[in-house]
Amino acid sequence: METIIAISGFGKSLFVAGAAEVFDDGGNLVDDKIRKLLGAYVEGFTEFALATRRTNS
């Protein structure tokens, strides 16, 4: 059985097929390509969150 992880939000998505191969038995991310993609996703989400955050008036 193949595991697929999907993360979506703010108009972007990240799908990781074969998640059993990109994470070790301890749940640590071991795939550098996916690490870069996830990093870019988190950076994009951070930019989105900062641009849309509410300010206290």
Image: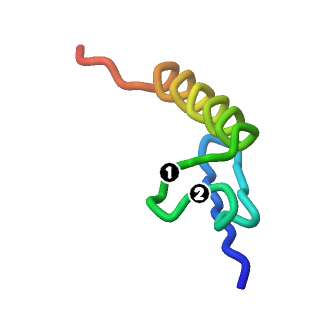
Residue at 71%, 57% in the rendered image: 16
Using the image, determine if residue 5 lies above or below residue 46: below
Where in the figure is residue 9, as x and y percent of width and height?
A: 60, 47
**Real-space Cα separation, disc 2 to disc 1, in angstroms:** 5 Å
Where in the figure is residue 39, as x and y percent of width and height?
A: 61, 31
Sequence-earlier tag: 2 or 1: 2
In the foreground, 25 or 38: 25
Residue on which the image places disc 1: 28
Circles 2 and 1 in contact, beta carbons < 8 Å: yes
In the foreground, 29 or 49: 29
In the rendered image, which quarter contains the C terminus? top left
Q: Quadrant of residue 6?
A: bottom right
Q: Which residue in the rendered view is the most extreme toward the bottom?
A: 1
Residue at 70%, 49% in the rendered image: 13
Using the image, determine if residue 47 lies above or below residue 23: above
Q: Number of labelled discs?
A: 2
Circle 1 sits in a helix, a strand or a loop, which is it? loop
In the rendered image, which quarter contains the N terminus? bottom right
Using the image, determine if residue 13 lies above or below residue 16: above
Residue on which the image places disc 2: 23
- Which residue type does callout 2 highlight? Phe
Q: Quadrant of residue 7?
A: bottom right
Where in the figure is residue 8, as x and y percent of width and height?
A: 63, 52
In the foreground, 22 or 15: 22
Q: Which residue in the rendered view is the most extreme toward the left?
A: 57
